[in-house]
Image: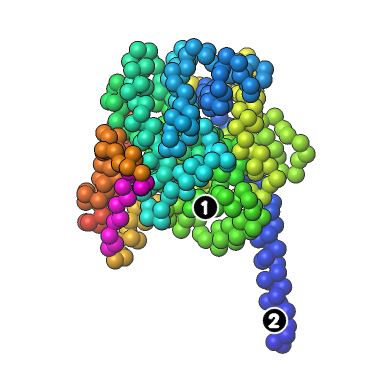
């Protein structure tokens, strides 16, 4: 009898392990966005342009490009380039970047390069994320990426403001970046929308960030809160948006992918997703996500690319995909190519004689409703976390300064206005008795809804959700 019981227990254990292995090995990138709605051509149109702008930042001379995408090149006027910052200009504070004025689309674009595997400064920037979480605007962000974003704004905010004022009120401010640069661009957008007066009073809806294959850089509440400004782009099985923090795991996934994937899969399998969402040190890909799908499970070759979009709270690329394309899908060249193909397919159906399935006004209202629903869902989740944390012993908050800790006295500079602004946003939660998460846009029509979530932790620990009409 005991032998039979042991045999039955072994069978159950083997069946459980086999089921787990099958589910993990058969998980495809297309499954992450299977329930998402398709993206529309007008909303997706700026993304291929942003990819080309980032690629152009790698060129030494746009008049004689060496890596221009085919067949039409970068589609950038070299005379419109305002500034090109190299590694010598950035002094290893952030990746090189490019600023140019797109007259045709009325956009001032700041494009940041991605991670350079041959430079130690990029590694230090990516790994500058201490165990103590960095507070920012009611949530948590990646410390090194925030420091890089503040440094760029210190250097270029006046230039951006001047070009925006010269271009007129209809001009948009666009931040774009790939990989490491995507995290820097996302943090610049998050800081910029909190001080729009420093950019000539530009409206919030005229600020955009396109984070291409981004590193995880902000907590779930901030990722949803800035979804109306920050748009992330992920190609199929890309490993970086799925690599969990701390970001030291990224280098394991580059140099020892099988070992890391096994350990991460085991850990994520036995960790409930609710627990992962409540972890304040767990960072996520920022904003609204556009997922480009070009391969189907159990299919050979590539399919015509489709694009799905959503503002997910649960299932926000939580599982690494066991795929031989996990590294190839991180390539900016390939992302730009597939994004342009997807846009061409969208425009063909959009310009056809068939009426659109969703009118423009209805589509804008549905996007606004989706954004508010995601904010409300995140607020409810954070309220549960606050209730759980209030039962624990209070802990002392650790303040992390934003200045560079270098022995070189050249780094000891007085704090700028941008650093003081970020420190104010970082310390607001410690000084206030409660905090508010607001999902609103400047200069919107007063008839639109704005969602206000107020957390009262001292009285009842409940979340009051007020809809203001």
At mark 1, the secondary structure is helix
Circle 2: is it few (<14), some (14-19), or many (20+) Cα within 10 Å? few
Q: Pick whichever, 356 or 175, lies toward us.
A: 175
- Residue 5 at least partly seen: yes
Q: Are marks 1 and 2 in contact (CB under 8 Å)?
A: no
Q: Which region is colored magenta?
A: 394-407
From the top left corner, tell me how far across and down residue 366 is, in percent. 46, 31
Compared with residue 303, is residue 256 higher up or lower down, i.e. above or below?
below
Q: Residue at x 72, y 32 (%)?
A: 303
Q: Residue at x 52, y 52 (%)?
A: 248
Q: Is residue 458 left or right of residue 311?
A: left
At mark 2, the secondary structure is helix
- The count of marks equals 2
From the top left corner, tell me how far across and down residue 452 is, in percent. 30, 40
Say the numbered circle drawn on residue 6: 2
Location of residue 160 by image quarter:
top left
- Residue found at the far right of this picture: 300
Q: Pick whichever, 125 or 142, lies toward us.
A: 125
From the top left corner, tell me how far across and down residue 218 is, in percent. 42, 44
Per the image, is 406 magenta? yes
Q: Is residue 326 left or right of residue 216?
A: right
- Residue 346 at least partly seen: no
Circle 1: is it few (<14), some (14-19), or many (20+) Cα within 10 Å? some
Per the image, is 448 magenta? no
From the top left corner, tell me how far across and down residue 369 is, in percent. 42, 34
Measure how far apart labels 1 and 2 are at the Cα level: 41 Å
Q: Residue at x 52, y 44 (%)?
A: 120
* Residue identifier under label 1: 248
Q: Counting residues from the N terminus, which is met first, the one under dot 1 or under dot 2?
A: 2
């Amino acid at each position: 009898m005991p032998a039979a019981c042991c045999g039955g227990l072994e069978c159950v254990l083997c069946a459980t392990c086999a089921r787990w292995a099958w589910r993990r090995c058969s998980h495809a990138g297309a499954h992450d966005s299977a329930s998402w709605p398709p993206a529309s051509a007008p909303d997706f149109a700026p993304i291929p342009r942003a990819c080309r702008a980032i690629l152009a930042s790698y060129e030494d001379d746009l008049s004689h490009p060496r890596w221009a995408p085919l067949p039409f090149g970068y589609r950038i006027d070299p005379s419109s380039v305002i500034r090109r910052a190299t590694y010598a200009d950035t002094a290893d504070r952030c990746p090189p970047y490019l600023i140019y004025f797109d007259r045709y689309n009325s956009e001032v674009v700041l494009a940041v390069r991605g991670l350079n595997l041959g430079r130690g400064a990029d590694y230090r920037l990516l790994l500058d994320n201490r165990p103590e979480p960095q507070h920012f605007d009611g949530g948590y962000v990646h410390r090194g990426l925030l420091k890089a974003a503040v440094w760029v704004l210190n250097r270029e905010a006046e230039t951006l403001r001047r070009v925006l004022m010269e271009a007129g009120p209809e001009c948009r401010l666009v931040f774009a970046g790939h990989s490491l640069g995507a995290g820097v661009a996302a943090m610049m957008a998050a800081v910029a929308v909190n001080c729009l007066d420093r950019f000539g009073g530009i409206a919030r809806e005229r600020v955009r960030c396109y984070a291409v294959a981004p590193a995880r850089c902000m907590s779930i509440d901030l990722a949803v809160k800035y979804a109306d400004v920050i748009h992330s782009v992920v190609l199929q099985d890309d490993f970086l948006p799925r690599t969990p923090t701390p970001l030291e795991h990224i280098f394991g996934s580059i140099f020892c992918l099988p070992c890391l994937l096994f350990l991460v899969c085991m850990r994520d399998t036995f960790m409930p997703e609710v627990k992962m969402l409540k972890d304040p040190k767990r960072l996520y890909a920022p904003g609204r996500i556009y997922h480009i799908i070009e391969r189907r499970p159990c299919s050979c070759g590539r399919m015509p690319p489709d694009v799905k979009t959503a503002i997910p709270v649960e299932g926000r690329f939580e599982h690494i995909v066991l795929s031989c394309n996990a590294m190839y899908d991180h390539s900016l060249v390939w992302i730009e190519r597939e994004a342009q193909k997807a846009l061409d397919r969208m425009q063909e159906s959009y310009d056809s004689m068939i009426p659109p399935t969703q009118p423009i006004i209805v589509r804008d209202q549905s996007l606004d409703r989706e954004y508010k629903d995601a904010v409300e869902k995140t607020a409810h989740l954070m309220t549960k976390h606050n209730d759980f944390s209030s039962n624990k012993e209070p802990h002392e908050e650790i303040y992390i300064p934003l200045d560079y800790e270098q022995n070189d006295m050249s780094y000891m500079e007085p704090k700028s206005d941008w650093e003081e602004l970020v420190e104010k946003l970082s310390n607001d939660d410690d000084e206030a008795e409660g905090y508010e998460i607001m999902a609103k846009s400047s200069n919107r029509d007063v008839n639109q809804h704005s969602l206000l979530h107020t957390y009262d932790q001292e009285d009842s620990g409940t979340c009051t959700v007020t809809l203001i009409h």
